[in-house]
Image: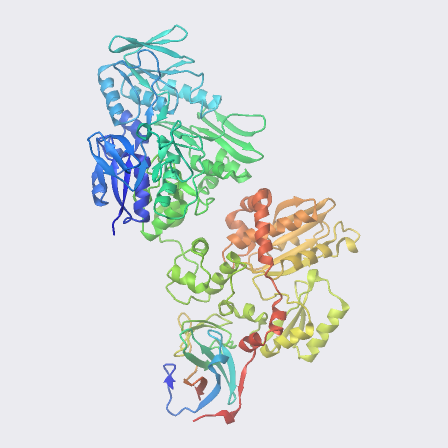
Amino acid sequence: MRRNKLVLIGNGMAGVGVIEQILKLNSDLFEITIIGSEPYPNYNRIQLSYVLEGSKTVDDIVLNDWNWYRENGIRLLTGTTVTGIDTDARQVLTDKGEAVAYDKLVIATGSKSFILPIPGADKEGVVGFRDIADCDRMLEAARQKTKAAVIGGGLLGLEAAKGLAKLGMEVTVVHLMNDLMERQLDPAASRMLQDELERQGLHFAMGKQTAEIMGDDHVTGLRFADGTELDTEFVVMAVGIKPNNDVARGETIEVNRGIVVDDYMRTTAEDVYAVGECCEHRGVCYGLVAPLFEQGQVLAKHLCGVETKPYEGTVLATKLKISGVDVFSAGEFIDKPELTIVKMQDDWRHTYKKVLLRDNRIVGGVLFGDVTQATQLQQWIKAGALMTADMHASIMGLAGEAAVTNAAELLADEDIVCGCNGVTKGQIIEAVRDQGLTTIDEVKGCTGACRSCGGCKPLVEQVMQSVLGDHFTGAAAQGICGCTTHSRDEVVAAIRDHKLMTTADVMAQLEWSNPEGCSKCRPALNYFLTMMWPREYVEEKESRFVNERLHANINKDGTYAVVPRIYGGVTTAEDLKRIADTAVKYGVKTVKITGGQRIDLLGIDKEDLPKVWEELDMPSGYAYAKALRTVKTCVGSAFCRFGTQDSMAMGQLLERKFERIDMPAKVKFAVNGCPRNCAEACTKDIGIVGNDGGWEIYVGGNGGIKPRLADLIAKVKTDEELIDISAAILQHYRETAKYLERTSDWVERIGLAAVAQAAVHDLENRKKLVERMEEALTRAADPWQKVIGSPEDKQALFETVKVAPRETAD
Amino acid sequence: MHEQAAVEEQNAVYIRVGHSEDFPPRLGKTVFVDKKEIAVFRLTDGRFCAIDNRSPNRKGGPLSEGMVSGHTLYDPLYDWKINLLDGQVMAPDTGQVKIYPVKIEGSDVLIGL
């Protein structure tokens, strides 16, 4: 079969990034040609400043060497410039006179330095800072001259200036504004940056507009609009970039500032795409690396016919790459009255941290001097996360090491760790596990994480540490049981991502070592599947423990115990009579009042269970289940002279609402009418304490094998909020807990603040949790009634076979 | 007629205990026959196994409610692993459950006593 011809114009990071993605998706799809003007293979343009300052060589920053092109069967034309695109004939024309045919064309020509249109800009000794050739000219100048001026106090200008200074030149940065990097930094950070750079030997001419570059053939100085002058022998223009869209000039491809593209990087010409700095998406031309990769991933998937989310723009984050000066900025960075500012300035350690909040959501941040939290902060900005005490401590560094080491744990598997290359936490974990990686360089090589700016290195290390344990050594993390090495989160992700609908599907997909699983994983998978597909999943009775399959508690002698529902521990004389009558009729051996305010009928034969249930005519109390067991209540305001809330009514309401649906482990509630706490909220999974103005909600209590006092998670004024938050906490627990993990361990593991954030403070998320809980609740039905009405269930699960001797064969 | 389990006793007396459809896959069934209590299992691959319905654990208890995986049974009360083909208790526990040969004739399930 003839392969489609894919032609890429531009051999830079954006374009080659797309090709790399395509090769990963389907290496047989295209016959690929790459045309580039520069005589180099693809290199990391971001690290040119390292080449300039001498900490790296050109070879060090090459991303794809010549072999890579050969190995992947890519035709590479370097030193070749495309002069035009013939969209009718579907071919591109080069300056070498060649016409290259395409089926799909990707334009990734990047950008050019913006050269100020002032007199003298064409003189010798005036350069931009964009490619290896510029870099070479600067290195050359540094050998021959002593004085340099850099016009532009932005990211690129400062990197160029620092590079030249390091090469021994006396450098003055000329900036139009009064603050350096004013498009990324607030005045305070800008001031600290300038102080630091002055300490390092740079000079600054602030608030100066360059009017003319003086000299004969070669530059000798700058004249400013205010009439002052500056002697210099070399000028670097770093006032900005402009999209390089020369090749697209014509009629069929719409060009504005950049080549106009839609959310799938399509230009207005059929089968012609543009990506990176040369394009303009939703009116924005980007000049930083992160958007290139995000655009590239969308384009690669689109070209390969793989379903993809549209590209909808990027939250920009900036990191200054000068050795010894760490600056990070993302999102909003200027103080405004409507924003809440969290700020810390330390003039002794020369650090500055600022986080900007709108309605308690993180919308921006600036870090100076200590950027270890940059990737984390960027994630939060991107997600619009709500600020919590833990996050505050983590960013501001007041919680010590503990908070810092938790940064990776706070990320979900699909969260991006390396913003440059779009590598997720899950991908790193997968690579480390599957390929046995132990060093950051191996991870770099395998996943691309940390390969561009390197800013995510601490986070990548944390992720690796979480997989490999301390010192990046030791065995891979344990699976959910002996049948698999996959963790709970990986299993749940696979169920979701691959739409797995049965335990057998999960075991096959994740290559279980034991094809039918074991008594540990089967019930767990059954639970994960009910949780994930509340409407579609048909539960597997054969993957339930006996108690949950038979809806009764097995006793050691093989008889069963039956506990009917007594909502909130409140019963009636009629119900008690019926319980007594049933107990007598079926010879119940023991009638026991339970710790959860109800009645246990012990010693019933399996075959009698459906009959007992029918006689009782009460719902199942789920005393056997990983589900809501009891809601313990005190008498409350209905009778108690101290009662401030109607705890009995609320307890019954909550029990009726949340009974029956599957949980990771058993769940117990308590509702108290006043702070005397007679129903012992402190030892319940969800404990509720009424007071005069509303309710307090406690979570994570346990009175069993590992006692734990519940933590206060919220105070609410209304019953509706109480029900809502309870639902959200339960659903969050359902979605994130390990199987058989009680809320006490769960709260300890993921942190009270994280639970509060997800189920209480983040109103949007809370609403979604409640919605998913409601969806799950719709399928809850009383299991006893179901069995009573189903002769098949009775036969399959409860009836025994009694064989008379006369049926003997042979 | 074909052989069901790895066990076969020439002198066994085979007794019909029901239709194969009476035994849902991977769910045990208690069969009372000849004063014995036997747990009968239908495996995923269609094979039938019959064992004494009493846990080899010293505390006893039934086995028919255990979870079935391949030809392994997980004891419902103590989670011991029992090989349904030979009745052996698997490590780390030890013990032996008596097994009975099973034959299928047409749709009839017969157990050899």
- Left or right? Give the position of A434 relative to A570: left
The quarter in which the C terminus of chain A is drawn is bottom left
Residue at figure coordinates x 53%, y 91% from the top left? A804
Q: Position of residue A151 (x, y in %)?
A: 35, 17
The tally of labels here is 0
Q: Position of residue A577 (x, y in %)?
A: 75, 72
**Viewer can see residue A318:** yes
- Picture colour scheme: rainbow
The answer to which quarter of the image holds residue A629 is bottom right
- Considering only vertical position in the picture, is A507 above or below A349? below
- Considering only vertical position in the picture, is A214 above or below A602? above
- Left or right? Give the position of A716 relative to A155: right
Residue at figure coordinates x 37%, y 91% from the top left? B10
Q: Judge by depth and name the residue closer to the eye, A754 or A364.
A: A364
The answer to which quarter of the image holds residue B50 is bottom left
Residue at figure coordinates x 31%, y 18% from the top left? A236
Q: Judge by depth and name the residue closer to the eye, A74 or A624.
A: A74
Residue at figure coordinates x 51%, y 52% from the top left? A736
Q: Judge by depth and name the residue closer to the eye, A802 or A217.
A: A217
- Left or right? Give the position of B94 relative to A785: left
> Looking at the image, which residue sits at the far top?
A227
Q: Position of residue A546 (x, y in %)?
A: 53, 70
- Considering only vertical position in the picture, is A780 above or below A69? below
**Viewer can see residue A446:** no
- Left or right? Give the position of A806 relative to A485: right
Q: Position of residue A600 (x, y in %)?
A: 65, 70
The answer to which quarter of the image holds residue A284 is top left
